[in-house]
Image (cartoon, helix red, strand yellow):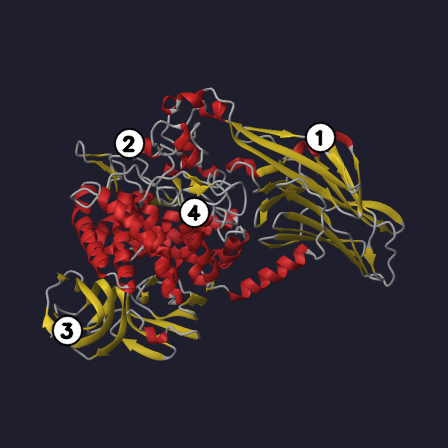
């Protein structure tokens, strides 16, 4: 029914109900959020028709949406009429929307006289549904052929501060201004009118005051006002041959300064963008999954959708290619972690550089930025820094460029130092939490321990320890390892609810009470392999909780229906797809592949119904309204959540500093993964055999036994083939299942023992399977470990720097 096209700072919505373009957004200098929406009307912003000479008669042919060809930045429609093939192309690039029509004829000689493209613009589409106020000037004639529009957006501080409701008057205020306006330091969403300094209560100050200019037309168009506020543009020159006609190009161009002269685009934007996205599609990963073809289509489209939302000046992406979202830190970081899989390392580096260079005054990563790149929605040092450390390590692992670590080391070290100084004796630090939008409604304040943040703090410590070893800062590496150990010792004791079988959201150390809420997002730390060690023996219980209370035939809820905070804000009772990644990791690690299959079914159904990954899907609705209440189309952090969850839960692939690990994904549908980018190479991955256990791997035809981690000798800039062999029974020899934080250099395998040569980067988590309880040797000395007899699995954590030998002997 509707589709967004997007590029850089511009987006346009083509819809069936309008018969044309229903909305055009532009991200200029106006306030963020809904003020990006400049032209919108349900009856259309732009409509298109062709005046044609058909069998000697002049006819007007409406060009409405049918026989469509799409890519993220353009849409083409095709019509056939009386021997004419009519093509309308609409595309966007940077700050311009461009329209062009083509006709060709089956007749040997076609008279093209009288052919013209007609574009109607709806003056009622100048929207004023914005934050603050928008004033439109009267349209002006510009260089005879063009129409010039001008909008001024203003937010008056005195009026804004007196707003009420959840997203009240302290939202959209950049952090620098917050420090001026408020008496105390308070995060966005928590300030009240009584917090405002006296001198700002009655000021005439404008928080925002921004201009946008819009040009409509073309050098070869004439225009005139029409009926009911519709202006009509008609082309007056053409290019044609005996069998084809091409209209001149009509453009809608946006500016943040009054244009002096418009230089019309000399090339077809549609052709430019088509070539760009065809090249991209040929290079991105492909997931063939016959049982769920819609999922395969989703997987193929994600890299292109991400690219269509990229703001080229910064390398950062808008939160989604449609609607009004600007650039957010969390969205960019989690989306960028998926970008490694299609090899977009240049933009990944730009994102790392941008976030390092655009922190708040206190060094924290803000939630988002204004159009002028002022930090907004900062919540202090915390979980964001964990995600940043993940990004830095991921980029380093893919490039082996030590300058990535050195260039970002002091920022990470500062974050670690600040959090360590704020931490209590138990290793945990007080915070209101980085998520969700309205943390106070969760029953938290700045003095609470919050599970999502404490888990992320653990992940930051583990990551910094690795980075410190790699740059040669041994004292910091040891300090970070000790801090991680302290957090791990107290994390479950603080948050785990044995009765519910899951973590509570927050704990107040002042009164020893939990807030008895159980959101899925507490598992953010599971997005890193370090999370397994933090949950320890509670991972299976967490998976059971997810399967029983969050996953249903409609989606994967953020909180249980019975949760006290189920309705604290819209997302809490909805399916928010980003968090599927952590949920699927828990389910897959626990071996609940029936639940993973249920998830695949609802993802497939959602994509077939909507044609995109939404920001959220409301779950507490009538069955017949199941797909009618949802958030923005193609929210990138949500698309990245599904993308990464498919790589893990379906393909069984996990990535860390030490390389690529294969995980058992029993009872999953048949699949083939092509062109996965990893460590400079491109990988094709598929399963062979059947059963519940992986018995061996084959890389480029070489069989590898005794390990599910691939040695680094295969990480070359070549094409690689990975076959994962399954069988009904465990192999009758030791098997390395997990190795986090180290590389497996080599494995020597025999019937009763396996010897692993490992290159470590500090604290390393190991997991083995063995037919019976083995003896474990580290550099020739026998060591203790945790043995789980019900699963025949051994776990241990070792400090490994450089190369070491680990041997398992059984029998």
Marks 4/1: CA distance? 38 Å
Residue 740: where, in percent of width, then height? 26, 63
Q: Name the residue under label 1.
A: 138
Horizontal side of 344 relative to 729 (left or right) equals right
Question: In terms of sequence position, does the residue under pointer 1 or pointer 2 come before the other?
Answer: 1
Marks 3/2: CA distance? 50 Å
Horizontal side of 728 relative to 192 (left or right) equals left
Q: Nearer the viewer, residue 492 or 345?
A: 345
Q: Mark 3 points at which residue?
A: 779
Q: Answer yes or no: do the residues labelled 4 and 1 have beta carbons within 8 Å?
A: no
Closer mark to the observer between disc 1 and disc 2: 1
Marks 4/2: CA distance? 31 Å
Q: Which mark is residue 443?
A: 2
Say which quarter of the image contains residue 772: bottom left
Residue 414: where, in percent of width, then height? 30, 49
Residue 431 seen in render: yes
Closer mark to the observer between disc 4 and disc 2: 4
Label 1: element kind: loop
Closer mark to the observer between disc 4 and disc 1: 4
Label 2: element kind: loop
Q: Is residue 655 above or below residue 423?
A: below
Q: Residue 358 carries which label?
A: 4
Question: In terms of sequence position, does the residue under pointer 3 or pointer 1 come before the other?
Answer: 1
Q: Answer yes or no: do the residues labelled 1 and 2 have beta carbons within 8 Å?
A: no
Q: Answer yes or no: do the residues labelled 3 and 2 have beta carbons within 8 Å?
A: no
Marks 3/1: CA distance? 81 Å
Closer mark to the observer between disc 3 and disc 2: 3
């Amino acid at each position: 029914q509707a589709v967004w096209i997007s590029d850089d700072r511009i987006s346009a919505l083509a819809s069936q109900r309008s018969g044309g373009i229903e909305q055009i957004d532009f991200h200029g200098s106006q306030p963020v959020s809904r003020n990006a929406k400049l032209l919108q009307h349900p009856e259309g912003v732009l409509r298109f028709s062709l005046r044609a000479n058909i069998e000697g008669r002049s006819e007007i042919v409406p060009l409405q949406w049918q026989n469509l060809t799409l890519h993220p930045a353009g849409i083409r429609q095709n019509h056939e009429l009386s021997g004419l093939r009519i093509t309308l192309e609409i595309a966007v690039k940077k700050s311009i929307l461009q329209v062009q029509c083509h006709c060709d004829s089956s007749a040997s000689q076609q008279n093209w006289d009288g052919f013209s493209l007609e574009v109607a613009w709806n003056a009622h589409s100048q929207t004023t549904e914005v934050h603050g106020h928008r004033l439109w000037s009267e349209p002006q004639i510009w260089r005879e052929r063009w129409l010039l529009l001008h909008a001024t957006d203003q937010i008056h501080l005195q009026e804004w501060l007196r707003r009420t409701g959840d997203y009240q008057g302290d939202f959209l205020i950049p952090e620098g201004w917050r420090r001026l306006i408020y008496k105390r330091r308070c995060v966005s969403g928590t300030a009240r009118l009584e917090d405002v300094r006296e001198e700002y209560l009655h000021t005439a100050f404008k928080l925002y005051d921004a201009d946008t200019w819009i040009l409509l037309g073309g050098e070869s168009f004439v225009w005139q006002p029409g009926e009911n506020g519709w202006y009509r543009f008609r082309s007056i020159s053409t290019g044609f041959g005996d069998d084809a006609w091409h209209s001149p190009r009509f453009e809608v161009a946006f500016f943040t300064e009054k244009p002096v002269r418009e230089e019309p685009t000399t090339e077809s934007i549609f052709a430019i963008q088509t070539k760009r996205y065809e090249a991209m599609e040929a290079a991105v990963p492909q997931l063939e999954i016959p049982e769920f073809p819609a999922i395969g289509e989703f997987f193929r489209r994600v890299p292109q959708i991400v690219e269509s939302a990229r703001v080229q000046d910064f390398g950062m992406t808008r939160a989604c290619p449609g609607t009004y979202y600007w650039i957010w830190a969390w969205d960019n970081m989690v989306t960028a972690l998926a970008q490694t899989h299609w090899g977009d390392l240049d933009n990944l580096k730009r994102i790392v550089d941008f976030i390092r260079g655009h922190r708040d005054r206190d060094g924290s990563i803000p939630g988002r930025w204004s159009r002028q790149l002022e930090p907004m929605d900062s919540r202090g040092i915390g979980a964001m820094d964990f995600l940043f450390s993940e990004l830095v390590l991921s980029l380093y692992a893919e490039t082996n460029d030590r300058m990535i670590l050195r260039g970002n080391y002091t920022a990470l070290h500062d974050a670690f130092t600040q959090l360590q100084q704020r931490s209590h004796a138990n290793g945990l630090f007080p915070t209101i939490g980085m998520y969700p939008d309205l943390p106070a409604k969760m029953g938290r304040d700045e003095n609470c321990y919050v599970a999502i943040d404490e888990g992320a703090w653990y992940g930051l410590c583990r990551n910094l320890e690795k980075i410190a070893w790699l740059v040669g800062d041994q004292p910091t590496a040891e300090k970070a390892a000790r801090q991680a150990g302290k957090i791990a010792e107290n994390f479950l004791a603080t948050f785990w609810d044995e009765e519910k079988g899951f973590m509570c959201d927050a704990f107040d150390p002042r009164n020893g009470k939990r807030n008895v809420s159980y959101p899925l997002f507490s598992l953010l730390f599971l997005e890193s392999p370090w999370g397994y060690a933090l949950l320890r023996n509670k991972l299976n219980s967490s998976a059971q909780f997810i399967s029983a209370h969050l996953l249903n035939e409609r989606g994967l809820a953020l909180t249980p229906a019975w949760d006290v905070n189920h309705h604290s804000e819209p997302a809490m009772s909805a399916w928010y797809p980003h968090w599927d990644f952590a949920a699927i990791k828990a389910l897959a690690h626990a071996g609940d592949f029936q639940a993973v299959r249920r998830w695949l079914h609802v993802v497939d159904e959602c994509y077939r119904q909507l044609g995109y990954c939404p920001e959220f899907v409301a779950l507490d609705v009538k069955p017949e309204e199941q797909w009618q209440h949802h958030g923005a189309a193609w929210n990138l952090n949500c698309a990245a959540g599904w993308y990464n969850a498919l790589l893990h839960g379906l393909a069984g692939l996990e990535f860390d500093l030490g390389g690529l690990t294969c995980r058992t994904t029993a009872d999953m549908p048949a699949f083939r993964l092509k062109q996965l980018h990893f460590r400079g190479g491109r990988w094709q991955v598929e399963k062979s055999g059947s059963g519940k256990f992986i018995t061996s791997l084959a890389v480029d035809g070489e069989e590898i036994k005794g390990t599910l981690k691939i040695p680094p000798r295969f990480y070359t800039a070549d094409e690689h083939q990975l076959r994962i062999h399954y069988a009904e029974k465990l192999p009758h020899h030791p098997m390395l299942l997990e190795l986090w934080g180290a590389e497996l250099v080599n494995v020597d395998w025999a019937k009763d023992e396996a010897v692993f040569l490992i290159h470590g980067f500090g604290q390393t988590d190991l997991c083995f399977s063995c037919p019976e309880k083995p003896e474990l040797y580290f550099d020739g000395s026998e060591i203790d470990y945790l043995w789980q007899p019900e699963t025949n699995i051994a776990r241990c954590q070792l400090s490994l720097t450089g190369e070491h030998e680990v041997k398992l002997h059984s029998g």
